[in-house]
Image: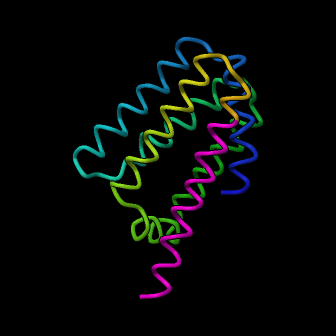
Amino acid sequence: IRARRVVEGETAALAAEHGKRRDFDAMQRAIDTMQSLADRNVMPLEGDRAFHVAIVEASGNAVLIETVQGFWDSRKGPLFTRLGGYFETVISWRRAIAEHQLIRDAIVARDPAAARAAMHAHMDKSHQRFSASWRRAKVT
């Protein structure tokens, strides 16, 4: 999560500077997908990836696009799949969805500093959720 925080904070800032209406629409569609899946008690990984990829694509930087896609490809591994299934809940995803909306709002407002801060806050909260779940798992 720490590497993602550094890279994706900057991609959010770049998206605020360079994003186009179609990029903003793609981000909202991804959030809507996440919400729809969460409403059906399905983990919304598909929408989550689409959201983060839409942001990096809006940045217009090919190297960053490859980097962020690499982060997501690493989440497909068996270890992450097993850990994600244990630590992620619909409740934690609902919080993440709200965080995604704040990120998009800052990007659409064309406020790079706010977009970066919102992404950093999201990554920090994601790390806290994961860490808290990890500590609970070690106790049980």
Residue at 44 percent of width and 25 percent of height:
28
Indicate the colouring scheme: rainbow
Q: Is the magenta stretch mostly helix, strand or loop?
A: helix
Q: Nearer the viewer, residue 40 or 130?
A: 130
Residue at 52 percent of width and 72 percent of height:
79
Q: Does the magenta stretch include residue 120?
A: yes
**Residue 113 at x, y percent in the picture:** 73, 28
In the drawing, does residue 10 fall left or right of residue 136?
right
**Residue 1 at x, y percent in the picture:** 65, 57
**Residue 140 at x, y percent in the picture:** 41, 88
Specify the quadrant of the image occupied by residue 58: top right
Residue at 54 percent of width and 27 percent of height:
104
In the drawing, does residue 130 fall left or right of residue 59?
left
Q: Give the range drawn in magenta.
A: 117-140
Specify the quadrant of the image occupied by residue 53: top right
Extreme-bottom residue of the structure: 140
Residue at 69 percent of width and 36 percent of height:
65
Q: Does the magenta stretch include residue 134?
A: yes
Q: Which of 58 and 78 is in front in this view?
A: 58
**Is residue 116 depicted above or below 1 in this figure?**
above
In the drawing, does residue 74 fall left or right of residue 138?
right
How many numbered dots are placed on residues in this image?
0
**Residue 87 at x, y percent in the picture:** 43, 67
Extreme-top residue of the structure: 21
**Is residue 4 depicted above or below 13 in this figure?**
below
